Image (cartoon, grey):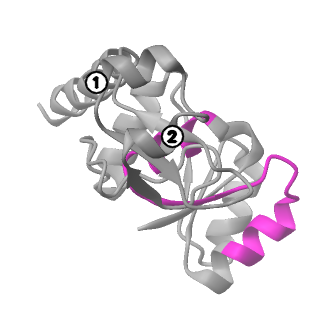
Amino acid sequence: MRFVVDGMLGGLARWLRILGYEVRYDASAKDNDLLTIAGEEGMVLLTRDEELHERAVAKKIVSALVVGETDEERLAQMASSFGVHLETNMGETKCPVCGASLMEKPKSDLADEAPEKSLKLYNQFWKCSNQNCGKVYWVGSHWKHIRQTLEGAAKLVRLEQR
């Protein structure tokens, strides 16, 4: 499943990338460009704009009007509507910033790119394969929040299914 996301849903774009999905996101993209990308590339259009959603449906483009206010609600909607899995796998995770693949790197290669404290505390690191981005990631203390958000979304899906 591949998504193109409108400028109001940057947070959702990052979450979907963390979950391993291909996501096109440009905060300044115009509605007509989003429709063209979704239609020509067979991507699902995600938007908070009712008019854009209606235009997509009229053009037979798969689209969702994202209604949730929290990350958990939005992710639950994606899981219910499109079968988005709510577990992370670092082998599939994309760079949340640019969407490129992540490559596992030995911490010895990252001495100048990751905080010294993180290099001491953690053993596994990943680097964005996009040379223009190059962000470095590790499963640190922030992953507690990531897990809680995904668990909250999964709980909402279970409640909805009752």
The answer to whether residue 101 shows anywhere in this view is yes
Q: Is residue 38 left or right of residue 122?
A: right
Which region shows up in magenta? 11-37
**Residue under pointer 2:** 110
For discs 2 and 1, the disc positioned in front in the rendered view: 2
Q: Which of 72/97 is in front?
A: 97
Q: CA distance from mark 2 to mark 1?
A: 25 Å
Percent x, y for residue 7?
76, 44
* Residue 158 sits above or below residue 131 on the image: above
Percent x, y for residue 147?
28, 24
* Residue 14 sits above or below residue 63 on the image: above
Q: Which of 123/135 is in front?
A: 123
Which residue shows up at 31% across the image and 48% down it?
90
Q: Dot 2: within a 10 Å radius of its alpha carbon, few (fewer than 14), some, or many (20 or more) residues?
A: some
Q: Is residue 26 magenta?
A: yes
Q: Dot 1: within a 10 Å radius of its alpha carbon, few (fewer than 14), some, or many (20 or more) residues?
A: some
Which residue shows up at 48% across the image and 61% down it?
101
Q: Which of 34/101 is in front?
A: 101
Q: Looking at numbered disc 1 in the image, what kind of residue is underneath it?
A: Arg
Say which quadrant the C terminus sits in: top left
